[in-house]
Amino acid sequence: MKKTLLAVTILTSFVSAAQASVTVFKNDTNQIDLKGRVYAGYVNQENNEDEVSNGNSDAYFRLGFKTKSQLSDSLTGISELEIQWAIADKEKQDKTKTRLAYVGTEANWGVITFGRQYVTDELVADWTDSAVSNVPGNDALNEFGRESNVLKFQGTYIKALTVGAHVQLENNQEETGKKSGFGMGAVYATNFGLDLGATYGIETNNEVDTTTTLLGAQYKIADVTAAVVFDLTDQENDADHTAIETSLAYQFDKITVVGRYLQKDIDGQADLAVDQVTFGAAYKFTKQFRIVGEYVADQAEGNEDALTFAARYDF
């Protein structure tokens, strides 16, 4: 209880600051930043087959800290912690998610981190993770996302080439079993708005190897951003699949409009196929506060369409 009250006190003290994160402490060698999000949404789902609809709340509170410490003239120590709490209709709920928890060092040659963090495939998968609401970001891709026990390196060179690599040490959890893996990737940014990227990763989950290659392109011109990512996945238990995600976003003044298409076919497993079209829009009153609406048309067998309305505050 005391820890919860302390977190709320800190949040209340700094939530009024008009910036993406708040510096709560800073001296010549150390800095601590506070960041967070409050998301309050409503989702109405309708089954394509029996036309039965249902509505539910979709809300969460996210709190995070980022730190920097000057270790030497050329080396900086960094860390990040980010925790999320799901908010339900009932008074009590135990749904806490540790999104990020890592420590590392940063220098002009790159960044090395260890802990729970995004793995290398996020270099490319993030391009089509453009939904404005809390719908799944990469529903078609076999992206490995955030993982624990990850040692990662990432650096940018000649102002255009970003390379990364990671190793996940064996992580044995009751929910997921034994997981380990490694990955690598690179992104090249041209000077006319086109980014090209590729990642390759292998994940071993309960002694089953899954190999995933992501190939992506992203093009930015004026207020338009278009992206496409291809997924080629090979799994030992014959659940091979190919997938594609596309995203087109247009931003004008305070309004952002996003359309996406997500498609995945898995050999012999039609129930795991993905066939979605999403349309979303966000209106930003300020950098901190926005309202969003998004519709997911899900054509896969047995799945439901969903309409989301939400308000979001970032600090």
Image (cartoon, rainbow, N blue to C red):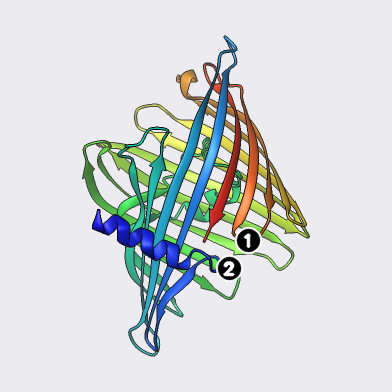
For the point 51% across and 56% down, the residue is: 123
Residue at numbered disc 1: 287
Q: Nearer the viewer, residue 198 or 113?
A: 113
For the point 58% across and 11% down, the residue is: 49
Kind of residue sitting beneath label 2: Ala
Element at badge 1? Answer: loop
Q: Residues within 10 Å of mark 2 (few under 14, many from 20)?
A: few
Q: Nearer the viewer, residue 207 or 131?
A: 131
Element at badge 2? Answer: loop
Kind of residue sitting beneath label 1: Lys
Q: Position of residue 111 (x, y in %)?
A: 41, 71
Q: Label 1 vs label 2: CA separation? A: 8 Å
For the point 49% across and 45% down, the residue is: 213
Residue 153 quadrant: bottom left
Can residue 81 be seen at all in this image of the molecule?
A: no
Camera-side mark, 1 or 2:
2
Taking 215 as reference, is 121 left or right?
left
Q: Are marks 1 and 2 in contact (CB under 8 Å)?
A: yes
Q: Nearer the viewer, residue 173 or 201?
A: 173
- Label placed on residue 18: 2
Disc nearer the start of the sequence (1/2): 2
